Image (cartoon, rainbow, N blue to C red):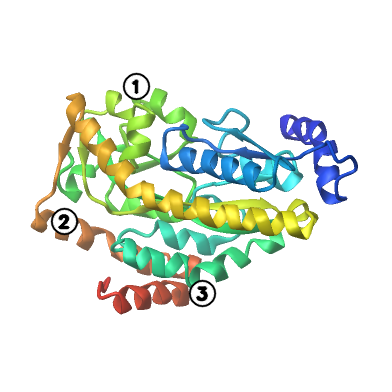
Amino acid sequence: MNRIRTAMQSVALGVTLALGGLAHAADPIVIKFSHVVAQDTPKGKAAEYFKKLAEERTHGTVKVEVYPNSQLYKDKEEIEALQLGAVQMLAPSLAKFGPLGVKEFEVFDLPYILPNREVLRRVTEGPVGKGLLAKLESKGITGLAYWDNGFKIMSANRPIHRPEDMKGLKMRIQSSKVLDKQMRQLKAIPQVMAFSEVYQALQTGVVDGTENPPSNMYTQKMHEVQSDATVTRHGYLGYAVIVNKAFWDGLPADIRSTLEGAMKDATQYANDIAEEENKQALEAIKASGKTHVYEPTAEELKAWRAALLPVHEEVAGRVGKDLIEAFYKEAAAAGSPIK
């Protein structure tokens, strides 16, 4: 808390300039954009692309400072930092909003709730996704966009071909009641841990395994400390690009409009590259020879789904039965029914 408040005070002048219009024409509006992953991930590249577009299109009136790899804050700290004004922009994973009190976002953590990218786009670009972002307003946060990372694979230090192979494994998860239920459903032991601490925890055996899209696993070198991975594609990892609401509302209307356009184009870029980046990362993990990557058979995938779909009913009271049904409707409309 003290570190966040100190940082907040150090940027107070920049925020004041933005909120009150520019006091001096030569002073740029500074947007500190903090995130917890590497620069060469889909999110890292998209953040840099947004910076480029924002600075070019505002002709230097806006300066975007990107801080990757938890340089400023770990993932447990960053939302509080945003609310206090110590940073202006984040792209946290969707699971981060549950602890904030917006439990509905944990619907994205449900296993096999998003069968493919077509269903994902229908949700995030349609009324369901927009309605979820609107729930952040009461927390002093404005939601701007959804950015993909990808579909997750399971990894561990032993083969995990079928659901029963997960029994007894200590698995790192984000702070999410849904992910906790998911691991317990598999008889694994969930361990909440900051993303920046996972590599060392895997290396030292504090945890046995984790779940990640391949791009996160590869860029954080987790494949160097995991013997096995299985391409379950059981869950989705995405982000919401968010800003401090007071800061955003206080921007000059023309600047805000220009930044919205830059964000729209950066979002298209982020989501276009995510799938290809994950394909390349998975191939790089295989080529490394450090992690054995297992592709489940159709029968094994059916077993994973059967083992995990009961989680939907278990957490319906937490994330909202109607919201889960809304996801089901989008999947059915896309020809990919969940049940």
When the figure is inspected, residue 103 is found, relative to residue 63, above or below; the finding is below
Q: Which residue is drawn at 41% across and 37% down?
A: 41
Q: Residues within 10 Å of mark 3 (few under 14, many from 20)?
A: few
Which tag, 1 or 3, sits closer to the chain's start?
A: 3
Residue 270 located left or right of residue 336: right
Helix, strand or loop at label 3? It is helix
Which residue has dot 1 on it? 203
Which residue has dot 2 on it? 301
Q: What residue type is labelled 3?
A: Pro
Seen from this angle, which residue lies furthest right? 23
Q: Which amino acid does label 1 sit on?
A: Gln
* Residue nearest the viewer, comparing 280 with 254: 254
In which quadrant of the rendered image does the N terminus lie? top right
Q: Residue at x 58, y 63 (%)?
A: 133
Q: Which amino acid does label 2 sit on?
A: Leu
In which quadrant of the rendered image does the C terminus lie? bottom left
Helix, strand or loop at label 1? It is helix
Which residue has dot 3 on it? 127
Q: Which residue is drawn at 49% across and 48% down?
A: 93
Q: Gap in Å between the C-alphas at discs 1 and 3? A: 43 Å
Q: Gap in Å between the C-alphas at discs 3 and 2? A: 31 Å
Pinpoint residue 336: horizontal percent, then vertical percent.
25, 72
Pinpoint residue 185: horizontal percent, then vertical percent.
30, 54
